[in-house]
């Protein structure tokens, strides 16, 4: 409550005056800068609802040139540069898209609900889409399908921006096969921290291209991405399988990602009754609830592999057999398999748009912890964290994601960081709790990280959050010096994405 009062006080002090640097901007851009409480409140909040950094102003750009002028005003015309953060849709959980005392660029203002998405074909590139960095993946899907096409690599949730996920990596159950979303980009337009709009690709201005992909917004604001498209399959044959044995669960997952038989492989932990119910109600038949509940009582921790094979009219008559052959090789608990068969859109959009519900977001905290864990230590992680710590987490957990990825589908020249092993697991503790419950999860998260540190498990955080320069240097490992050099080259005044707290 006290925090809210302080925030309102700061907001009311800010509403009346424009920051002095706005004098350096062309008048038509000044008109698109807001300092009113609504704009400031939105720009100082995100999905995590854990930190609130108050900017001095918010830019609602009407063109890419507005962003260029804003950054130039900071970089060249102003004695003390102000920081600038692109805000996709604010799905970060720890203020990564905020700019305390600086300017937040609300990328949504550029969005024309998919109007910024253009589908093309060329003999050398095949099918691709040129997409504004502000657009959301749900619109890329919709526009692609109008041409019978779709991207190959996704996130679970489609209401994230293209610029936002490409600044991280963009992962889901297709990543084992096609790589993260950053591996499926042909070209970018980026406004650097020097206020230059640069087109880059693997062959042209490649340093910026590789640096910006997975670059946590540090080198520039992505205003266009050229994304690989392929012929869209019509339907998804979809199944969830239940395991009680961790070794069998991981062995089957690793087997599935070693072949290209499937299009999607993920996995989840089933940690207690509430999760079982949540899981069940969204997918399987009611008759199996008691089976799963009694199993859970016995084991306290169950595992689920989720898998999908796409098909279309041409392969409709063989899908049953192909799916059957894949399942036959797996060691899930007999009978505990739940199937669906849905149009591609229903599968890709399975999470819906729940993450954008403002009231739900403001009433909850989301202290998520996402880790990449080397395969060679996954059983140690199981012993220390899944068996020991997870069952003791008393508060109702959110969703716990658990699936392996192939490093060969990642490009090590990009800024995204992974463990140095052929296969590593993505483990997401997607906690959700009331606003007063964050401590429980923060303690859990730091115990998990502490355990890994002590046991020498070389985990990397995905969607990273680190508190000190030393932790960031450790995070980037051998990539640190090149990342730092790129920062000096493209954002020497350290203007961009201060909310990541790497250089600021
Ligand atoms: P923001 O949170 O607004 O921004 C994220 C960072 O990128 C900030 O540092 C910001 O300054 C910078 N940024 C934003 N736009 C640009 C741009 N155009 N150019 C350069 N930098 C920019 N991630 C996955 O990989 N897979 C998932 O399945 C997945 N599911 C999710 C589900 C939910 C419900 C939520 C809340 C998040 C999920 N995420 C997932 C995480 C998501 O990828 C990140 O939150 C990411 O930040 C994208 O969110 P956003 O577009 O709102 O970007």
Image (spheres, rainbow, N blue to C red):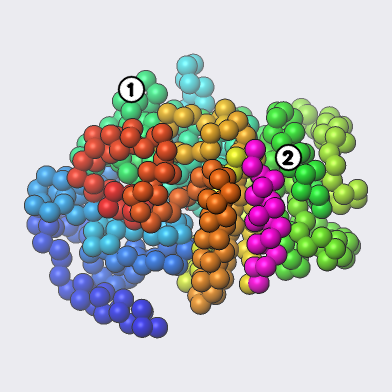
Residue plotted at (57% across, 55% down)? 451
Q: Mark 2 points at which residue?
A: 253
Q: In which quarter of the image is residue 331?
A: top right
* Magenta residues, start to end: 376-394
Magenta stretch: includes residue 392: yes
The relative height of residue 189 versus residue 346 in the rendered view (above or below) is above
* Closer to viewer: mark 1 or mark 2: 2
- Horizontally, is 21 left or right of 262 in the view? left
| Mark number displayed over residue 204 | 1
Identify the mark nearer the N-term, 1 or 2: 1
Count of numbered badges drawn on the protein = 2
**Towards the viewer: 388 or 347:** 388
Can residue 105 be seen from the camera position used here? no
Residue 298 at what x, y percent from top left? 85, 63
Q: Residue 300 vs residue 21: left or right?
A: right
Residue 375 within the segment the image draws in magenta: no
């Amino acid at each position: 409550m006290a925090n809210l009062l302080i925030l309102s006080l700061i907001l009311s002090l800010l509403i009346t005056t424009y920051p002095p640097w706005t004098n350096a901007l062309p008048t038509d851009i000044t008109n698109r800068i807001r300092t009113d409480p609504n704009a400031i409140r939105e720009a100082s909040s995100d999905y995590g609802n854990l930190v609130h950094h108050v900017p001095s102003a918010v830019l609602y750009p009407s063109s890419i040139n507005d962003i260029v002028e804003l950054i130039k005003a900071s970089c060249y015309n102003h004695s003390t540069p102000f920081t600038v953060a692109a805000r996709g849709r604010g799905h970060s959980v720890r203020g990564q898209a905020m700019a305390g005392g600086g300017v937040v660029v609300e990328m949504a203002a550029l969005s024309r609900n998919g109007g910024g998405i253009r589908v093309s074909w060329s003999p050398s590139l095949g099918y691709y889409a040129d997409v504004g960095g502000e657009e959301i993946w749900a619109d890329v899907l919709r526009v692609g399908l109008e041409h019978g096409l779709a991207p190959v690599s996704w996130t679970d949730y489609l209401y994230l921006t293209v610029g936002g996920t490409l600044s991280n990596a963009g992962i889901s159950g297709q990543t084992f096969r096609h790589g993260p979303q950053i591996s499926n980009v042909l070209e970018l337009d980026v406004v650097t921290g020097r206020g230059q709009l640069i087109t880059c690709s693997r062959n042209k201005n490649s340093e910026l291209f590789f640096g910006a992909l997975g670059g946590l917004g540090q080198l520039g604001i992505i205003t266009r991405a050229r994304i690989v498209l392929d012929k869209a399959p019509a339907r998804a044959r979809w199944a969830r399988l239940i395991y009680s044995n961790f070794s069998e669960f991981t062995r089957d997952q690793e087997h599935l990602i070693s072949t290209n038989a499937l299009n999607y492989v993920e996995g989840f932990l089933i940690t207690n009754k509430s999760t079982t119910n949540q899981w069940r109600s969204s997918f399987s038949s009611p008759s199996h609830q008691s089976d799963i509940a009694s199993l859970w009582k016995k084991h306290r921790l169950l595992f689920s592999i989720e898998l999908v094979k796409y098909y279309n009219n041409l392969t409709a008559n063989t899908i049953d057999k192909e799916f059957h052959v894949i399942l036959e090789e797996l060691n899930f608990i007999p009978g505990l398999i739940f199937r669906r068969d849905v149009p591609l859109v229903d599968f890709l959009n399975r999470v819906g748009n729940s993450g954008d519900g403002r009231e739900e977001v403001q009433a909850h905290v989301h202290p998520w912890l996402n880790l990449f864990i080397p395969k060679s230590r996954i059983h140690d992680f199981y012993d220390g964290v899944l068996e020991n710590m997870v069952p003791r987490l008393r508060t109702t957990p959110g969703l716990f994601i658990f699936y392996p990825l192939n490093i060969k589908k990642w490009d090590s020249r990009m800024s995204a960081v992974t463990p140095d092993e052929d296969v590593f697991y993505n483990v997401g503790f997607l906690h959700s709790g009331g606003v007063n419950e964050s401590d429980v999860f923060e303690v859990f998260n730091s115990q998990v990280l502490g355990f890994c540190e002590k046991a020498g498990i070389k985990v990397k955080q995905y969607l990273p959050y680190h508190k000190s320069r030393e932790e960031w240097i450790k995070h980037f490992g051998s990539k640190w010096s090149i990342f730092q050099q790129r920062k000096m080259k493209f954002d020497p005044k350290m203007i961009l994405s201060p909310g990541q707290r790497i250089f600021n």
